[in-house]
């Protein structure tokens, strides 16, 4: 689960770019390693072969000079050293001669001396003064001796170091180039998906007029056509459902009007009825009132879904408006308080809809929240609004987003209410506030209960 969470946090474009970069790094590093290994092997072998060939030539010269009478060995070694820029060492019997004080018998590895003493030419890499050297030995059995030369490998190591650094730099450049190509390729490949994502987000927010353009690519054109067909089918179904709800609500108004008229007639003769009949009349009156509110809410929602509702905006002094709206609500005695400077704030609002918002929230607190404790008019920078606080059990955390859904009953929202509501009041609050480009949410009230907060943009 943790690995899946990490993969979700890393975007697909980033993963594609990283994949290209890692691939380029592995390929370039492998190629650089192979190139460096082959070049190093060739240069070292070439240098050793050259040193061995030169040592053989110098050994023949030394042997011919030693065969003469009274050879001058120091002068001989000096003359051999000058053209080759190496350091010669000569053994005659048990005596050792060197052209340099720094290079002599002790400088040569014992294994190399023993191998040459056995009559076999040999070579070995050594370090002298922290610098790499190549020691080559040639046996001279004719004079009971051996000839050695020590060659400096500083130039070879410098060449190999330059080659290694160049290989690393080339690998880094290739990695950056691979990442750049990966980013460019992912952008080209994922740009159609970004368009689909934006279109899907627009459809989810209610913009059903969004369509994807069909490109020249067959696969993308098929995806765009399928998306457009899906959006069109969804829009058709939503319109059909909205029209059905509107038609049903309109059809119910006529019998409801008849029932309400009949109820008024019966209520006018209430005193002539026995006690049981009056109780039944009260129940019938309550249910018809509830039925009327349900039909009105359904008609309001169907008009919003159909997109035929238009806002009639006016400048509204928020503090005064909330006071008047509460007075005409189901709980006119609910106290209204103003935070400093909030009461005179002006917002652009549709008075009918904003009054409905206040009434629904107050009625929700009265029915399902144990009564409205207070209504507070507030100001928060570019936002102004009000909060309706009740004395109920509050709304559970997992239900605070769903409490504004249609037909979501209060009993499921933290055991609020008695289940008599239609589940449309808070949904209408959400719709009306959304039409004003505002926000509405529910939070806990300090001391217990729920606090429904409405925020609207302040008029410029």
Image (cartoon, rainbow, N blue to C red):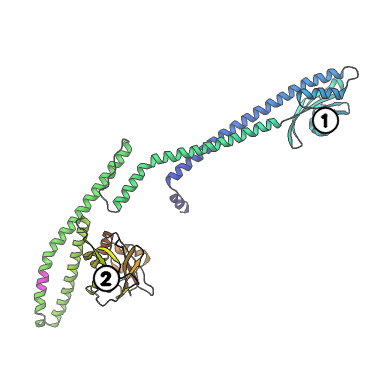
- Tell me the residue that label 1 is attached to: 100
In the picture, the disc for residue 145 is none
Quadrant of residue 421 in the image? bottom left
* Residue 289 at x, y percent in the picture: 17, 71
Instruction: Identify which residue, 60 or 389, lies in the foreground.
Output: 389
- Tell me the residue that label 2 is attached to: 322
Q: Is residue 189 above or below residue 253?
A: above
Instruction: Identify which residue, 22 or 154, lies in the foreground.
Output: 154
Quadrant of residue 412 in the image? bottom left
* Quadrant occupied by the C terminus: bottom left
Residue shown at the point (51%, 39%) measured from the top left: 176
* Residue 85 at x, y percent in the picture: 76, 26
* Gap in angstroms between the C-alphas marked 1 and 2: 107 Å
Q: Is residue 172 above or below residue 379?
A: above
Which residues lie in the magenta part? 258-263
Q: Is residue 413 above or below residue 199?
A: below
Asked if residue 424 can be seen in this view, the reply is no
From the image, give the main secondary structure of the stretch colored magenta: helix
For discs 1 and 2, the disc positioned in front in the rendered view = 2
* Residue 223 at x, y percent in the picture: 31, 41
Are circles 1 and 2 on residues that touch, CB within 8 Å? no
Q: Dot 1 surroundings within 10 Å: few (below 14), some, or many (20 or more)?
A: some
* Residue 428 at x, y percent in the picture: 25, 63
């Amino acid at each position: 689960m943790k690995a899946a969470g990490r993969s979700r946090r890393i975007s697909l474009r980033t993963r594609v770019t990283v994949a290209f970069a890692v691939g380029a790094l592995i390929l370039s590093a492998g190629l650089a390693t192979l190139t460096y290994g082959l070049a190093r092997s060739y240069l070292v072998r070439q240098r050793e072969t050259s040193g061995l060939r030169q040592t053989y030539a110098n050994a023949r010269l030394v042997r011919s000079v030693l065969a003469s009478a009274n050879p001058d060995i120091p002068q001989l070694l000096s003359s051999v050293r000058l053209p080759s820029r190496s350091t010669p060492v000569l053994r005659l019997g048990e005596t050792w001669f060197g052209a340099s004080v720094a290079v002599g018998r002790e400088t040569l590895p014992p294994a190399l001396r023993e191998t040459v003493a056995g009559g076999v030419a040999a070579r070995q890499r050594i370090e002298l003064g922290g610098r790499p050297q190549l020691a080559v030995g040639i046996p001279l059995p004719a004079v009971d001796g051996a000839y050695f030369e020590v060659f400096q490998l500083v130039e070879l190591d410098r060449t190999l170091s330059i080659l290694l650094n160049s290989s690393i730099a080339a690998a880094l450049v290739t990695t950056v180039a691979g990442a750049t190509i990966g980013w460019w390729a992912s952008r080209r490949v994922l740009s159609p998906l970004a368009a689909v994502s934006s279109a899907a987000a627009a459809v989810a927010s209610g913009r059903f007029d969004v369509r994807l353009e069909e490109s020249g690519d067959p696969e993308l054109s098929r995806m765009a056509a399928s998306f457009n067909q899906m959006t069109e089918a969804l829009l058709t179904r939503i319109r059909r459902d909205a029209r059905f709800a509107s038609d049903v609500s309109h059809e119910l108004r006529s019998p409801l009007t008849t029932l309400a008229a009949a109820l008024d007639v019966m209520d006018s003769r209430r005193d002539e009825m026995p006690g049981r009949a009056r109780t039944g009349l009260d129940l019938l009156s309550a249910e018809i009132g509830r039925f009327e509110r349900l039909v009105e809410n359904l008609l309001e929602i169907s008009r919003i879904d159909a997109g035929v509702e238009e806002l009639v905006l006016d400048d509204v002094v928020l503090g005064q408006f909330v006071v008047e709206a509460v007075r005409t609500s189901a709980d006119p005695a609910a106290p209204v308080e103003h935070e400093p400077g909030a009461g005179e704030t002006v917002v652009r609002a549709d008075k009918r809809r904003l009054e409905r918002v206040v009434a629904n929230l107050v009625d929700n607190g009265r029915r399902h929240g144990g009564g409205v404790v207070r209504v507070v008019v507030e100001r928060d920078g570019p936002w102004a609004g009000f909060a309706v606080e009740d004395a109920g059990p509050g709304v559970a955390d997992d239900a605070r987003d769903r409490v504004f859904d249609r037909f979501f009953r209060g009993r499921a929202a933290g055991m609020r209410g008695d289940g008599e509501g239609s589940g449309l009041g808070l949904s209408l609050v959400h719709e009306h506030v959304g039409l004003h480009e505002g926000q509405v949410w529910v939070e806990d009230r300090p001391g217990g209960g729920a606090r429904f907060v409405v925020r609207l943009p302040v008029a410029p």
